[in-house]
Every structure is written in C-alpha cells, then in structure tokens.
Image: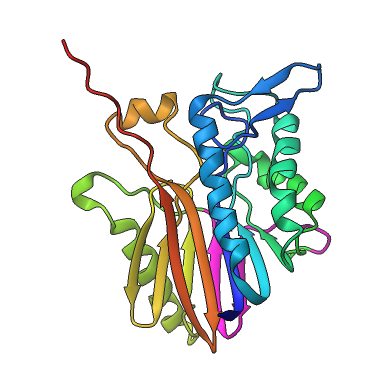
C-alpha cells in the first residue's frame, strides 16, 4: 500500500552517552577508535531495524521529526561520556544523515539545556548540518514546538512533559498533557490537535480524549548511573514512533525494543 504520508519520530538519542545509541566504531579527533559496547551494539541493531521498517513503507511524502536531544551533552558531572559535546554532535550527524537523505523533510525540536546546551543549541547545530526546516525564528533550524499539518492531521510536537511518577500513578502525565491541551484550546476557541507528541521521560505512553491522541515516545538510551539511582528496578524499552496518514486519518505505531532483564545469580 502506498500511503499519503509516513512520519518517523525519534527522540532522546543521547548520542555520546556510553549507554545510548552509538556507531559500532567511530574515529575520535585524536585518532583513537571508539568501540561500541555490547549493549550499544544491540541498540544499534534496534536502530537499524526501526529505520529499515520505516524506509520500506511506500509514501508520497516522508518526514522525520527528531523530538529533542540528539546528544547526551556534558552535564551534572557525568563521566559516562564518549567525547566532548562537539564530538557528540558530529556523531549525531553521521548517524542521522543516511536516513534524512531518504525523506522529504526534517523537523527538529529543541531538548533540555542539560543535554542540548542553552536554548537547545546542540540540537540546532545538528539540525543545521542535516538541512532541517526553518522554525518560527527566521534563520534557525530548530524550535521548541512544532505544530504541523500532515495531510489534514494536526500534529503538535514538543520535547518536555512531566514525569511519569510512581507505578500506581503511571499514565497521569500523558492524561494531563492531553486534557490540558484540549481544555486550553477550548477556552481559546481553537481546535485541539489530532496528535500531541512529547518525549523527555523515556517511558512510552498513550492516551486519547475525543479525537485527540497523546503519545510519549521511548528513547534510545539504557539506564545510566542516575537512572539506577532513582529507579534501579526499572527496565524501559527503546524505540520510536511510525505514523502513516491517509485521507486525513493517522495510524500511530509505537515501535519498542526491550532490553534483557538482569540475570539472577545463584548464591
């Protein structure tokens, strides 16, 4: 089947983290060759599987949205890094370019300052090199929020969303996101978007109210030191969204890949 539109949404790539997406090998500026770990090789396999599925789709127009945080960045005295911020940005360009070259348009959302530098400039620098669409500020290739009409489907993209909280309140964040948006639109006599897509918390979720569906995307990063501190038993999947649009209707597929559970050792 040939679709009208196909949209790939990825976020929180955190390239440069030693537990996130990485090339299998990469030449650093001083000549050292970076080798991906076993976990990173698995992430890379999932990354290739995701893009293979997307590129196989037949569509009149194909779009990629990176919903914030190409790179891990240098932050919070974190030492689980594979290079300085500019090296991470170069790695991000190399990893994204083969896929960007196969689509019509790229939209880039700015992530948090901790990972993406002040005002999301790490995302901006990668967006510039990849030829992303210009945002609301003339000359800048990324933005904090994109509202895009894709074949009659209004898609609202931004990076940040509140945390998911403890398991017994799971989903409150995506419900709040959708209902807050719908109510704000109603108060201002505007139509609510068809799709609201947020990221940041790495935990995929979905909620629908009326015609509006909200999604929180997975990431491309496994647990790091901070993650083990706040949620040592949490095992979050990696992945992204694939959206097809036909005749003003969207189908959204959350593609996730789950890492192995920690082994149980015999005492």
Q: Quadrant of residue 209?
A: bottom left
For this rendering, which residue is in front, 62 or 153? 62
User: Does residue 194 appear anywhere in the picture?
Assistant: no
Judge from the rendering whether residue 208 lies leftward or rightward of residue 94; answer left or right: left
Number of marks in the image? Answer: 0
Across and down, in percent, residue 236 comes to 36, 42
User: What span is colored magenta in the figure?
Assistant: 138-159
Across and down, in percent, residue 208 comes to 34, 73
Most extreme residue toward the left is 267
Most extreme residue toward the top is 267
Magenta span has 198? no
User: Does residue 247 appear anywhere in the picture?
Assistant: yes
Q: Give the color scheme: rainbow, by chain, secondary structure or one colour.
A: rainbow
For this rendering, which residue is in front, 100 or 65? 100
Residue drawn 64% across the image and 76% down it? 59
Q: Quadrant of residue 230?
A: top left
Q: Quadrant of the N terminus?
A: bottom right
Magenta span has 146? yes
Residue drawn 76% across the image and 63% down it? 137
Judge from the rendering whether residue 263 lies leftward or rightward of residue 94; answer left or right: left
Residue drawn 68% across the image and 28% down it? 25
For this rendering, which residue is in front, 65 or 8? 8
Across and down, in percent, residue 112 comes to 57, 44
Across and down, in percent, residue 247 comes to 54, 89
């Amino acid at each position: 089947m040939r679709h009208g539109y196909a949209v790939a949404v990825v976020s929180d790539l955190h390239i440069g983290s030693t537990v996130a997406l990485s090339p299998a090998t990469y030449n650093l500026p001083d000549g050292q060759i970076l080798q991906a770990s076993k976990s990173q090789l698995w992430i890379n396999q999932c990354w290739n599987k995701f893009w293979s599925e997307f590129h196989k789709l037949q569509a009149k127009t194909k779009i990629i949205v990176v919903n914030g945080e190409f790179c891990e960045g240098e932050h919070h005295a974190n030492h689980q890094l594979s290079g300085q911020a500019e090296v991470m940005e170069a790695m991000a360009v190399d990893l994204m370019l083969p896929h960007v070259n196969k689509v019509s348009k790229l939209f880039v959302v700015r992530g948090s300052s901790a990972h993406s530098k002040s005002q999301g400039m790490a995302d901006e620098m990668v967006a510039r090199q990849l030829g992303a669409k210009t945002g609301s500020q003339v000359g800048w290739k990324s933005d904090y929020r994109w509202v895009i009409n894709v074949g009659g489907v209004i898609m609202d993209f931004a990076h940040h969303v509140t945390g998911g909280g403890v398991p017994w309140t799971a989903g409150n964040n995506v419900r709040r996101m959708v209902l807050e948006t719908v109510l704000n639109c109603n108060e201002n006599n505007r139509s609510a978007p068809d799709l609201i897509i947020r990221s940041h918390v790495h935990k995929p979720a979905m909620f629908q109210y009326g015609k509006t569906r909200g999604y929180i995307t997975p990431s491309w990063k496994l647990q790091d030191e901070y993650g083990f501190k706040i949620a040592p038993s949490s095992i979050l999947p990696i992945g992204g969204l694939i959206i097809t649009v036909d005749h003003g209707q969207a189908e959204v597929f959350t593609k996730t890949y789950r890492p192995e559970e920690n082994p149980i050792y015999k005492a």
